[in-house]
Amino acid sequence: MARRGATVARVMPGSIGEEMGIEPGDRLLSINGKTVNDILDYSFLTDEDYLEIEIEKADGETWVLDIEKDYGESLGLEFDAVVFDRIRSCINKCLFCFVDQLPPGMRSTLYVKDDDYRLSFLYGNFISLTNLGRRDWNKILEMRLSPLYVSVHATDPDTRARMFGSEKARNVMRDLKRLAEHNIEVHTQVVLCPGINDGRILEQTVDDLKSLWPGVRSVGIVPVGITGYREGLPPLTPVTKEMALALIDLVDDWQAKFRKELGVGFVYLADEFFVMAGKSFPEPWYYDDYPQLENGIGMAASFLEELQDLLSGLKSIETPEEPIYVICGRSAESMFADVVRMLEPLGIKLRIIPVTNHYFGGRVTVTGLLTGHDILRALGRSYEGERILLPKTVLRDGGTLLLDDMTVSQLSAMSGAEIEVVDPNPRAMLDAVLGRGRQRRPQRRERCQNQ
């Protein structure tokens, strides 16, 4: 059982917390007699101008502090987590669950089946609404936690119950209406499983969700992810090129209609569909204000748009003489091909190293799930001495280990390449390509032809 309260990680110098003798390692137990379960409680309760705070010191002694302050003034306390009690786990048995398809030995965060409304509000995680109790609903409505992100998949009760493996999943339209009535906006997700929630079911889902506008602000459609580790799980059909092409046309028709009725496209397709179909990514206007960017919807268009803005603002650059290489998963290959074309007029020689994900069976194409051995398989010794950019998303929990426990230094040693970890955003990538903030290595001497 999780301990009550939250451990203080940092106290800001000169803050009220420091004045009151609160120190890192102390536990914040309650504010005005109410338990603090998460950062939302803390922010909500500390807004008042009079506080009675209960603190447990490192030696076990309990302090009760009376604090008078200006309304909204911060106490200056920081915490390492946003959830202090425990993250709510998913109680469903979704037939398409990606976590159930993971091999053992990967980074711990990949195995977490969170279904926590607090993480939905704070980080845009998608939730099912199936595990909300009365207290949860009261908190959502009283604090006006908006927007939330909800995995719908289907509004047809039978289909949704089948997909979630739970009878509690039947009431999604009732729950979405309740949120809309309290002016809480929702962004929804459909994981498309061919033969299950496509066709007529998908059309019904979009119609039902559109009926809740403006409470439901967007519908994001992503393809089901299938790995090579589905032993004992229900059979699933992957999305094909033909399906992707037909869906793109269908969503184009929907968007044209919704833009006239609502002023926005409302329904948006994940980047993977365009990769599967062999089509160019849509222009930025297709995504409106990118309501589901963290869901992989519009990431390519957003990246390219931001990069173009950065390039337009360049006054002068020192162009690297040698080519620079970037590693990516197969789904990002076409985006980086556009990046290459954008950089060529500047004399920058960026080259792509697309990596096939053999570890997951070949169907998982995102960069963030590449392993060290698959990257090494693509590199061999062909890139010895070359500068290679490795997106930080492939590392476990932000450290130096890849998913299969290979380190970046091991990958560099075995390939002979100069591996440089880089944040996967346009500014960081451009800075890395241009060598900004990097100590230049000596130029390689050309081999004499007479030797």
Image (cartoon, helix red, strand yellow):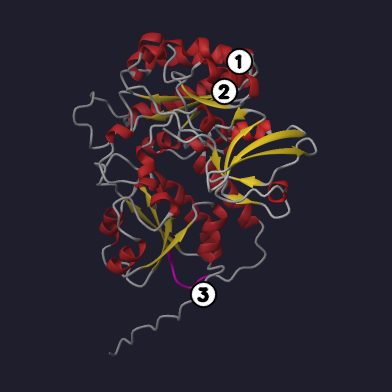
Which amino acid type is marked by label 2? Val
Q: Using a 10 Å C-alpha cutoff, classify the residue at mark 3 as few (fewer than 14 neighbours), some (14 to 19) or many (20 or more).
A: few
Q: Nearer the viewer, residue 420 or 286?
A: 420
Which one is earlier in the sequence, the residue at label 2 or at label 3?
2
Q: Is residue 419 left or right of residue 314?
A: left
Residue carrying label 1: 180
What element does badge 1 sit on? helix
Residue carrying label 2: 186
Q: Nearer the viewer, residue 360 or 97?
A: 97
Q: Is residue 434 magenta?
A: no
Q: Which residues are magenta?
A: 320-324
What element does badge 3 sit on? loop
Which amino acid type is marked by label 3? Gln
The quarter of the image holding the C terminus is bottom left
Which one is earlier in the sequence, the residue at label 3 or at label 1?
1
Q: Is residue 32 visible?
A: yes
Q: Residue at x 58, y 51 (%)?
A: 24
Q: Nearer the viewer, residue 338 or 39?
A: 39
Q: Residue furthest left?
A: 231
Residue 291 at x, y percent in the picture: 57, 32
Which amino acid type is marked by label 1? Ala
Q: Are marks 2 and 1 in contact (CB under 8 Å)?
A: yes
Residue carrying label 3: 439
